[in-house]
Each structure stands twice: as C-alpha cells, then as structure tokens.
Amino acid sequence: MSERAEVLRRLGEQREPWDVVVIGGGATGLGAAVEAASRGYRTVLVERFDFAKGTSSRSTKLVHGGVRYLEQLNITLVMDALRERGHMLRNAPHLVHNLQFVVPAYDYFSLPYYGFGLKVYERMSGRLSLGASKLLSRKKTLAMLPGVAEAGLRGGILYHDGQFDDARYAISLLRTFLDLGGTAINYVEAVGLLKRGGKIVGVQARDCEEDTRFDIQAKVVVNASGVFTEEVLAMDGAAGESLLAVSQGTHFVLPHSFLPGDAALMVPKTADGRVLFAIPWHESTIVGTTDVPVEGASAEPRSMASERTFLMEHIERYFGRRPRGEEIRSMWSGLRPLVRKGGGGKTSKLSRDHTILVSQSGLVTVTGGKWTTYRRMGEDTINQAAGVGGLKKVASRTLGLKVHGWTEGSAAMAEAERVYGSDLPLLQRLSDEDAALDTLLHPRLPYRLREVVWAARYEMARTVEDVLARRTRALFLDARAAMEAAPVVAGLLAKELGRSDAWRDRDLQQFLDLADGYIYREE
Ligand SMILES: Cc1cc2nc3c(=O)[nH]c(=O)nc-3n(C[C@H](O)[C@H](O)[C@H](O)COP(=O)(O)OP(=O)(O)OC[C@H]3O[C@@H](n4cnc5c(N)ncnc54)[C@H](O)[C@@H]3O)c2cc1C
C-alpha cells in the first residue's frame, strides 16, 4: 500500500475524533497545523490541490515588516512582522536570508524622507535588526544597482529585509508538521462540515484523485482556505456581507543581467502610488507587483493586460529599456485575501492584518495577514481553537521551533541547494547511488533529476506541476525551460508513483497547458 493510500485508510477508519482539522495547506494552514501539533494536539491538514498551490507560492518572496505599512502608520503590524522576520531567519536560515535593498532617489526630498523612515524601520526591529540603514551617494547607488536609470539620480537609501523561497518554506513547514506527528494530505478537499446539535464536529472530505468521500471527526475545525474562505464559511451556512476583498498581484521574472548586483531595488511610490520591487532571486530578477481588485477567487489566476503594461512601463523607467518578450522568462499572478473593514476603496489601502472569526457553530476562520506573520497567525488561531474544542491548555512553543532542514553554515551554497538544508546530503545520496539522477533537468535550470525522485518520495509531490512549480521553482524561474523539462519529469514521476503511461501523458499535457499561461507573449 502506498503511503498516500495508508494515510487515506487511517483517515477513513479513524473513529476517535481528531483534536484539530485544518482546511487549507498554504502558509496560514501549515502555520496553524505546526502550532497545533507542536502543542501536542492530534492534527490533520487537508489541502484540495497541492500545498502552497494558492497565494503562498506566488508572493514577492519577502520576509518583511512592510515599509509601506509604516507609511500607513500601521505600527503594530510592522512591529509584529519585524519580530517574526527575525525569528524566521533564526529558525529557517536555509530558507530565509538577509538582503540589501536600495531605494533610488530621483529628487532631493526623497533622501531625507525615506532615509528617516527607513531608519525608524530599522530601529523598530530592535535586537532582531538585520543591519543598519544608510544614505548612499549617487556613485554608490549606481554601484549597488548597476543598470538602474541614471538620469536625475541623486543618491539612494540602503536598508535590510529578509528574502525567502515561499513554496520551499511551505514544504519545509509540511515536513516540520509531519516530524511533529501531524497528518497531512494534498488533493483532498473539504466539501462540507459535519454538525451535531448545531456544533461542528468535523469535515466531509473528498479524495480528489479517486473521487471518493469520507468523514473526518474533529473537536475543532480551522478554516485557513485563503481567498476561498467564503466558500468554507458558506458550508457553515454563513451568508450575507462579504468578508474578503481579493486583490491580484503579478510578477515578471527577468534574466539576472537586468539587476546584476546582489542588492534589490525598491521603489516606495510609483507614479500611481504603488510599491515596486526588483529583486535578485535564484540567479534571476523578480519584478513586481501590481495590486488590482478582482472579482472572486480562482486557483490559477492569470495576469491582465493592464498589469503587464504597468510592469513593462516601470521596467523601462527604472532600467532604461523594455525587456524583449523572450527575456520575460516567467510571469505569475497571486491573489491576496484582504479583510474588508467596511466600505470599498482601493485594495492597496486595505489591512494586511489577520482576522480570526469564530462562528456560532464553532468554525474557527483565519484569514488576511502576510506570509511573514504566518507563525503569529497560527499561534493566535490555535489559542482560539483550543478554547472552542475544549482542548487542554498548552502554551505556544513555535517562536523558537526550528523548521525542518534547519542547519548552520549553508549561506555559501547555491540557493537551489541551500533550501534543502540538512536534507541536502540525503538528496545527494540519491545521485551517488544512481549517477543518471545527477543529470540537470535543463541547461537553464539549477535542478537535477534527483530532485524529482526526492519530491515524490519525501515531499508528497503528486503531479508534474507539483515538482516543477513548488518542489523546484522551475516554472516560476523559466516557464519555457520548465515545459521542455516536463516530459522527462513526467516519465520519472510516473515511475516513482507506479502510474500508467496514460496517466503520465495526461499529467504532462495538463502541465503544458498550465505552463503556457506563465509565458509572456508580445501584445
Ligand atoms: C502578489 C502577492 C505578493 C505577496 N508578497 C508577499 C511577500 O513578499 N511577503 C509576505 O509576507 N506576504 C506576501 N504576500 C501575502 C502572502 O503571500 C499571503 O498572505 C499568504 O500566502 C496567504 O496564505 P494562505 O494560506 O492564507 O492562502 P493560500 O496560500 O491561498 O492557501 C489557502 C489554501 O487553501 C486551500 N483550500 C481552499 N479551499 C479548500 C477546501 N475546501 N478544502 C481544502 N483546501 C482548500 C487552497 O487550495 C489553498 O492552497 C503576497 C501576496 C500576493 C498576492
């Protein structure tokens, strides 16, 4: 029996209620699950697609307090996030690192204004500071941001923030949860809530691979379904005013040559008042993001023409030239679940704070927030959930909990390998035992065949997309290269999972159709 079949059998046969069931395997759900399991609660997490398939693999990859929120005077959010940033760096040094950011100043007012603001930002992080912020001369700014537009440049401001690999962090949180004795399964969705006497006593689940249904009894259910939050609230019978505003953000990935140094560029206010980043990531440059209100949620959001135009225009403004179509190696969009505090208005002004709601029937819903604050969200959620489920009171211990793979001294490694942390020697052993697995997936991608085998055996990858989008970041780094590598990945994955040729071909085609949407085409 495969490991997945064994988990499904256990879930189906379990009669004793679990302490906690978490719906949703993004940053929020995984954070809550780790929090619950680390307190000793028997916890199950169900994810209807793959872990981090939603917003949590589509962020700007910043572990940050949020300079913009400081300008909005949301001091508590910034303080909380800066504290979490420091702890993420300590607990997951293989996944998070300190990055230098430079704000280029094109007028004399910007230098003192942002210089002062970023000094305050640095001071707010206290002993968890990542380094001093300082004013830079024009010459030093150009040295740190080679290629940045020179006309009118007066100087710059240097500050520090964190950067991470979001989907790899999610997979490492999954492994942390499993290490703590938790049970997690992807491609299983919550389709209903079990109720007795008006109180929620579990979840009706559907195995999306086999289209079979089963019940999971639980003392408390946590709804961490991101932009799908209202779907789950509707299962609880909630109707009426909508809780969330959904905002889309799109990024382009360009060759490293657009920003060849080690520092990131940050524009605090574009002509239309947005924040824009250009960030080195896995030997490439990410540029983003946009902030556009959209109607409703979708699992695979697509960029809009207006977002592509915005990014093109701003790349041209700050780097002096428009990228050619083929230089945009990938583009992806993500949806922010933003909590409405009454009234309409621009989504960029809505709160990035998290909200926890407990319904009359005991559904604990957590939504909003940021990747950076996932741990704090998990702690607050499980504090509430423990009360609702009548669980034994246990204090949180996640602030100092090391994330799976934690290791010292991996900073010098290439990013694609560093993310495996202490697992790297085990991954390398796969290709020591079978030299064929040492082959690169593609000349433009920093991954080898062994990563495919590893993802299937130890990281619950079920599809080519899981491997190329989230276990490796191939699709996000270079969509064309990912498509070219996909047939080999499909063959190897089918072999690992004991799948038929028909399954392999279908899964490959599904990936190719999806990946096509990550390719920029001239308009
Ligand atoms: C463009 C953009 C850039 C961002 N950049 C940053 C950044 O740089 N730094 C930062 O800190 N934050 C950033 N954020 C915010 C951050 O990414 C989100 O706050 C976070 O990822 C939300 O995680 P989540 O788990 O709530 O949602 P999701 O990641 O969407 O997870 C929800 C999960 O629930 C699953 N689900 C839904 N319904 C069901 C069901 N019925 N049964 C089972 N599973 C279900 C979904 O499939 C999904 O996987 C950014 C967001 C966006 C959109």
Image (cartoon, rainbow, N blue to C red):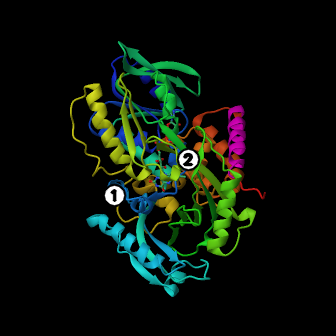
The residue at which mark 1 appears reads as: 75
**Residue at (37, 19) in percent of width and height:** 201
Q: Is disc 2 placed on a helix, strand or loop?
A: strand
> Relative to 382, is 486 on the left or the right?
right
Left or right of residue 224: residue 396: left
Q: Determine crowd level at label 1: few under 14, some 14-19, many 20+ residues with C-alpha closer than 10 A.
A: some
Residue 398 in the magenta stretch? The answer is: no
Task: Write down the region rendered in magenta.
Answer: 502-518
Q: Main secondary structure of the magenta part?
A: helix
Q: Is residue 443 visible?
A: no
User: Measured along the vertical axis of the image, is residue 263 above or below residue 436?
Assistant: below
Do labels 1 and 2 touch, CB within 8 Å? no
Compared with 192, 167 (above or below) is below
Q: Nearer the viewer, residue 73 or 496?
A: 73
**Residue 212: x percent and y percent?**
56, 20
Question: Is residue 514 rendered magenta in the image?
Answer: yes
Q: Position of residue 292 (x, y in %)?
A: 59, 50
**Image quarter (top left, top right, bottom left or bottom right) of the C terminus:** bottom right
Res. 247 mark: 2
